[in-house]
Image (cartoon, coloured by chain):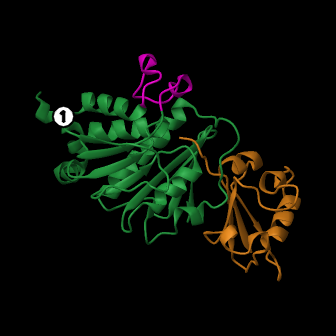
């Protein structure tokens, strides 16, 4: 299984803090995002990705605590048991 | 009661040794706006030994909803000298050091800082600030947006770096929604963590506390 965690405004939007999705050989962040959207009625991918399918600035995506921008981005491969976190941190002070 | 009883109520809670550590410690407050005004105020009330303040901003009307050290007559004044004046009025025992200028690539961390409070309002400055933090120094980050906010502690040189974690977190266009209640709550949590950092028992090391006031949600994001 993969654990998908939602924080802050994403959690508010989706009205849930986590879901689990069965892991499939070949899964990437992108494919799991698509599967997550299919499982959740509320549209949210537009909050994470821009029109060209790259990750939005503003929401950080972590795989096992590592920002995907330091891995392989949306093509980062996932293993069974991985934890994905979607977190749009507050910038204000 | 006498001035010597200033800290009596908190010492009842955390004891004389932890109070001594607070009084012997120095922290750098990066930004004395929303978060920084309350963070510095609470630290001074608690008897912190020394605060370094850095912020190149001047007070403007939209600041007054949350920047608890300032008032209407202060509009237009530079925040750092103003904050120093107000903090000195609260507790003259704390040494307040004004650092001039802004946080850019020329910024140098003063020697002897026991921890850094990131009370800034944008990620580019935060990335720059973190690069100036010496290895082995604790860095307590706070940030907020509307009724959401977060607090995270990093230990420079050992934790993932701030810009590794927050890569891609950029400034939204236009002003960020910020309410007085959320600012004070996040600032209070930062101060609680700063005390723990000074006592070498941080609770949020590599662990981001994410607060949602929409439903009083508190969640942890391991970093």
* Among the 4 quarters of the image, the one containing residue A21: bottom right
Q: Magenta span has B70?
A: yes
Q: Residue at x 37, y 51 (%)?
A: B194
- What residue range appears in magenta? B58-78
- Of all residues, the one furthest to the top in this rendering is B73
Query: Residue at label 1?
Result: B6
- Of all residues, the one furthest to the front in this rendering is B106
B167 vs B14, left or right, is right
- The quadrant in which the N terminus of chain B is found is top left
A20 vs B7, left or right, is right
Q: Magenta span has A38?
A: no
Q: Residue at x 31, y 57 (%)?
A: B114
Shown in orange, the chain is A
* Among the 4 quarters of the image, the one containing residue B222: bottom right
Q: Residue at x 53, y 62 (%)?
A: B162
Q: Is residue B184 above or below residue A67?
A: above
Percent coordinates x, y for residue B124 in the rendering: 58, 52
Shown in green, the chain is B
Percent coordinates x, y for residue A86 in the rendering: 69, 59
The answer to whether residue B212 is visible is no
């Amino acid at each position: 299984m993969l654990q998908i965690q939602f924080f802050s405004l994403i959690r508010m939007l989706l009205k849930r803090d986590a879901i689990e999705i069965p892991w499939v050989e070949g899964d990437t962040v992108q494919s799991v995002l698509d599967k997550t959207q299919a499982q959740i009625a509320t549209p949210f991918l537009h909050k994470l990705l821009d029109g060209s399918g790259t990750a939005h600035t503003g929401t950080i995506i972590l795989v096992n605590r590592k920002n995907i921008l330091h891995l392989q981005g949306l093509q980062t491969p996932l293993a069974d048991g991985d934890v994905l976190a979607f977190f749009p941190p507050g910038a204000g002070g | 009661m006498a001035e010597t009883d200033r800290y009596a109520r908190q010492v009842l809670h955390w004891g004389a040794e932890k109070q001594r550590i607070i009084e012997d410690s120095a922290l750098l407050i990066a930004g004395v706006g929303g978060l920084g005004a309350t963070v510095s105020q609470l630290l001074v009330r608690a008897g912190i030994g020394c605060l370094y303040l850095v912020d190149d901003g001047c007070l403007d009307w939209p600041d007054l909803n949350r920047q608890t050290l300032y008032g209407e007559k202060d509009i237009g004044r530079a925040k750092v000298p103003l904050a120093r004046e107000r903090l000195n009025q609260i507790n003259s025992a704390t040494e307040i050091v004004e650092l001039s200028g802004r946080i850019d690539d020329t910024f140098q961390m003063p020697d002897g800082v026991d921890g850094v409070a990131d009370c800034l309002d944008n990620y580019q400055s935060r990335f720059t600030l973190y690069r100036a933090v010496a290895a082995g120094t604790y860095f307590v980050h706070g940030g907020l947006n509307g009724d959401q906010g977060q607090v995270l502690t990093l230990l420079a040189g050992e934790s993932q770096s701030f810009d590794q974690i927050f890569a891609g977190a950029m400034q939204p266009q236009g002003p960020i929604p910020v309410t007085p209640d959320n600012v004070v709550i996040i600032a209070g949590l930062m101060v609680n963590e700063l005390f723990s950092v000074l006592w070498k028992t941080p609770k949020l090391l590599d662990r981001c506390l994410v607060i949602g006031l929409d439903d009083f949600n508190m969640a942890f994001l391991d970093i």
